[in-house]
Amino acid sequence: MSVRFAVAGTPGDRRVGLFRDAVVGRGLAEPYVVPWVDVLAGRPLGVPEGALLRIDSPGEDAATDELLRGPGDPARVGGGSAWYKAFTAGLERLAALPGVRLLADVSEIGVMFDKRRCHAKLAGAGVPVPPAFEAGSYADLRDGMAGHGWARVFVKPAHGSSASGVIAFQAHGGRIKAVTSACWIDGMWCNSLRVRTVTEEAEVRRLVDFLGGDGLHVERWFPKASVGGAAFDLRVVTVAGTPTHAVVRVGRAPMTNLHLGGVRGDLDVVRGRAPLWERVLEVSAQAAACFPGSLSTGVDVLVGANWRSVAVAEVNAFGDLLPGLTDFSGYGRDTYAEQVRAALDGRR
């Protein structure tokens, strides 16, 4: 009997399309699509028995977002706790499907979507990570910074993704500076595709207190290496525990996310420094080893300003959306084709 793939995702989403192309490219039938909206709404899920099920991101579908966070503008910031509760319930429903073989462990996905738990897991395994603490308000943030003696931090919603609500924050005496993509529009905090700088403490307090209700993960600022005057980091994709793809993300802002103005840089900037490149691969594999049941991870690796030290900022369950990027070993496979190949080979 031929192998049949299935994918939990949003029909029409480019993630689903790229995975479909990788499956069909191996001469297999198109993957069966399990819409996230059906998973979350409790509708019947007719997944073929014996299918290899890939769990992908719910994406930016408005109907799905409403089931995850409740009614409201999908561009709004916040609602992470509600999102996480509904999302993990959906994961458990997928895990309970009879006769289906999952390509990821749902409990591991749950950990990766809680920055506090993920950080603790990595630190416990000896993976280098920036020191961190938890906060629930602006007062907690300032008290924690003072207690640790930190002047610069990254403030991250515990269950956020795509830099939603992230704040690069610094305080020197009575002066503060916050860089974020969150902005107040029509009576709500919303995501913007442009980062902005805020120096009014009252506005930063309102934003942090708003986000704090869902929990905050606060990391000490890690001074990053730069090229051409712009800081960079790396997204390293692992497949079956092995680093296979990497992209350098260069940005003028503290957040290098490509949708926030970051651009792809030259990977040879890092590969050309053999000891550094080996260290990047080593810590990426270390991070992936913390999630042995997951076919793929996206590891965000920070390179220090000294071009020697490295740290893992995050591990992403759905960090493989890098269109057009082929493996650095030279086989010409994108992240999806590499995963299909590993799944067919029986590797996890």
Image (cartoon, rainbow, N blue to C red):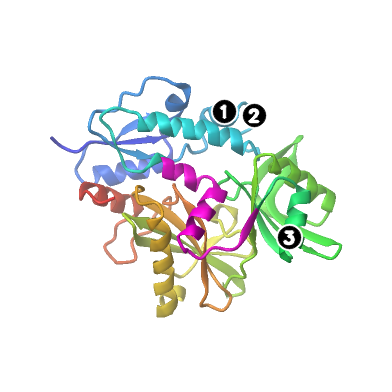
Q: Position of residue 26 (x, y in %)?
A: 21, 46
Q: Secondary structure at mark 1?
A: helix
Residue placed under numbered mark 1 in the picture: 66
Q: Amino acid at mark 1?
A: Glu
- In 3D space, how far apart are the residues under numbered discs 3 and 1 (Cα atoms)? 35 Å
Find disc 3 in the rendering and name its residue: 145
Instruction: State whether residue 14 appears in this view.
Output: no
Residue 227, above or below 107: below
Give the percent coordinates (x, y) of residue 10: 43, 34
Q: Is residue 122 magenta?
A: yes
Identify the element where label 2 is drawn.
Answer: loop
- What's the distance in space between the residues labelled 2 and 3, CA to CA? 33 Å
Marks 3, 1: nearer the viewer? 3
**Residue 72: numbered disc:** 2
User: Left or right: where does residue 155 sit relative to residue 110?
Assistant: right
Say which quadrant the N terminus sits in: top left
Tell me where the magenta segment starts and ends, as one range: 107-133
